[in-house]
Image: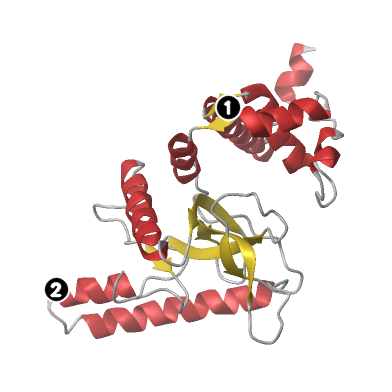
Amino acid sequence: MAARVSSRPANEDRFRASIRRALALGWLTAFRRRLYEALTSRADALFELIDAIVCADQPVTSLVQLSLEPEFRRGHGALYDALAAGNINADALTDLLVEFLPVAGPPRRPRPGRDEIAVEERADQDSELLALADALAVLPADQARATTEACLPRGIRPRFAIDGTPYPRPDAECSPDRGHVYHDACRCDGTRKTIPGWEYQFVAALGELRSAWTAPVDVARTTHSTRLAVTTDQVRALIGRLEATGQAGGGLPIPVIVLDAGYPATAL
């Protein structure tokens, strides 16, 4: 038996694949442990609720539906109790999401027939970088460095988007702090373009080119009057977390934060 085993050549590809799986499992285990620690009340029920949302094989349309998922091992009463009495350490959760950002951006689904285009895009990018290097050779060092930083390819520089999303609650007259938010279901009468509800502002890491994947890292309730202050706080907090986790600062590329035309660029 020993002779037969030793005579077989080692499969290096399978060995490397096993190492990658072990590292990914360790990464996932650490993430789930930190996520559980961020749940400060009704942690078990909230953690199973998260698993139920992630593992549901169809769009989630009701809370009762989540209580029927195998991952949620409690009754529907425990689900409502977790949402009513549970608590989350928001700062710890945001720290976790920023620290565990995907290294190369969110995963991309392979697109059949796009390999040739991807190769051509890479070749075009390389030629652009060579042309840029020639142009920078005649500039002073500080200007060349600033220009290089501004022209880094998208895949190298971390990019984030900030935008608000409405949560309409037209019939929840007893819900606190409702305002008027823009939404498709605005029940417009020709003049009004809003509906009673709340607005939440998300910060999300953007994927690579031609990818719809994002990695949300922060969310806050906002209104029209508080949007500037909330946006400023979210940007400062994001940069601080990126520097604390070694993803920004020093000689690393400066992150880019993208906003639409509804934000006051001068004030920001």
**Which label sits on residue 25?**
none
Res 259 quadrant in image: bottom left
Q: Amino acid at mark 2?
A: Ala
Query: For this rendering, which residue is in front, 139 or 65?
Result: 65
Q: Amino acid at mark 1?
A: Tyr
Which structural element holds mark 2? helix
**Which label sits on residue 36?**
1
Which structural element holds mark 1? helix
Query: For this rendering, which residue is in front, 102 or 214?
Result: 214
Horizontal side of residue 151 vs 190, given as left or right: left
Colouring convention used in this rendered image of the protein: secondary structure
Location of residue 136 with respect to 52 vertically, above or below: below
Query: For this rendering, which residue is in front, 165 or 73?
Result: 165
Q: Which one is earlier in the sequence, the residue at label 2 or at label 1?
A: 1
Q: Quadrant of the N terminus?
A: top right
Q: Is residue 127 something one can see in this rendering? A: yes
Query: For this rendering, which residue is in front, 162 or 139?
Result: 162
Which residue is located at x 56 percent, y 53 percent?
215
